[in-house]
Amino acid sequence: MEEKIIAQKPAEGKPWDVVIIGSGPAALTAGIYTTRGAASTLILGGEKWGGQLMLTTEVDNYPALPGIQGPELMQKMREHSVMFGAEFVEQNVDAVDLAKTPFTISAGGTNYLAKSVILATGAETRWLSVPGEDKLRGRGVSSCAPCDAPFFKNKNVVVIGGGDSAMEEALVLVKYATSVTIIHRKGEFRASKAMQQKVIDLEKSGKIKIVWNTEVTEFVGEKKLEKVKTKDIKTGKESELAMDGAFVAIGHVPSTKIFKGKVTLDEKGYVEVAEKTKTSIPGVFVAGDVHDFHYKQAITAAGFGCQAAIDCLKYLDSAN
């Protein structure tokens, strides 16, 4: 039987071969490959580790694992990532210094040195930025149906959005709520055909209502959400819907705040790719939703993590 490769930690005061920032499918897959490549690897996963799949229930499209729960999938990925010697630290990264090598990454009051870095911080929920949203967040306004749906059993809820995430929110909520209304600012969904069909079938059966060409203008309530104000984009007509819950599902923004001015970002704030998974800084690589705004799938994020790790290993070989 072939002996397992176990990457060794660097000596005290010496830099890690690779520091991976993030803990979603991209980061954890990268960790598997870098340690299998015998590179000492530190994964700075954050206090809330696991990425967006930690907020997901059933995952049907990850190869070989149909029906697995999102958090269970991420736990398996984490266990796999440390199997070959990676160290996982649940601390948020506070700052990065990529101006010189070894690079310095600060997290939880500790400075870590790195010969190379993989940026895999993913993306965060995009909010509507309308009146009442901040005040009522956690008091009826949410972005995670798998987390909060049980609180809305036998209540009336609305989902705002038209992509896959909005469809998934609605499909989760319909199991709990008395009524589920989807509000979309356009006349057709942008979600995948399979996800659309599930929602449309439920609309035909009366379990879901769809309101087209409409935007939410305000969330109303004192201690909790009571109403959702809307506006018809075509006619300008304003309406109020009595709602117990509202789930915002309009996309995400890249988690790149700490990288601003350190690596080149595009106009949307995503990390710009110079070549393959290389960033504007030699020795710094990128993987997943922090640069990918086209696919945004767990499997593609994992694929990018694999690519970034291989590119990183080649860089380390050439630097030695």
Image (cartoon, helix red, strand yellow):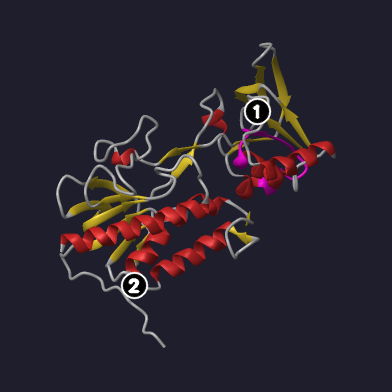
Q: Is-magenta flag for residue 18?
A: no
Q: Assess whether mark 1 and mark 2 are in contact (beta carbons under 8 angstroms).
A: no
- Quarter of the image with the N terminus in it: bottom left
Q: With respect to residue 95, does 7 lie above or below?
A: below
Secondary structure beneath dot 1 equals loop
Name the one closer to the observer, 203 or 106: 203
Q: Which mark is residue 293?
A: none
Q: Residue at x 23, y 52 (%)?
A: 283
- Quarter of the image with the C terminus in it: bottom left
Q: Residue at x 64, y 31 (%)?
A: 225
Left or right of 142? Residue 276 is left
Task: Report which quarter residue 255 is drawn in.
Answer: top left
At label 1, the amino acid type is His
Tell me where the magenta segment starts and ends, as one range: 149-165
Q: Residue at x 36, y 84 (%)?
A: 3
Q: CA distance from mark 2 to mark 1?
A: 47 Å
Task: Report which quarter residue 15 is drawn in.
Answer: bottom left
Q: Which mark is residue 85?
A: 2
At label 2, the amino acid type is Gly
Q: Which residue is mark 1?
A: 184
Spot occupied by residue 301 in the image (x, y as percentages of width and height): 46, 52
Q: With respect to residue 74, does 197 lie above or below?
A: above
Secondary structure beneath dot 2 equals loop
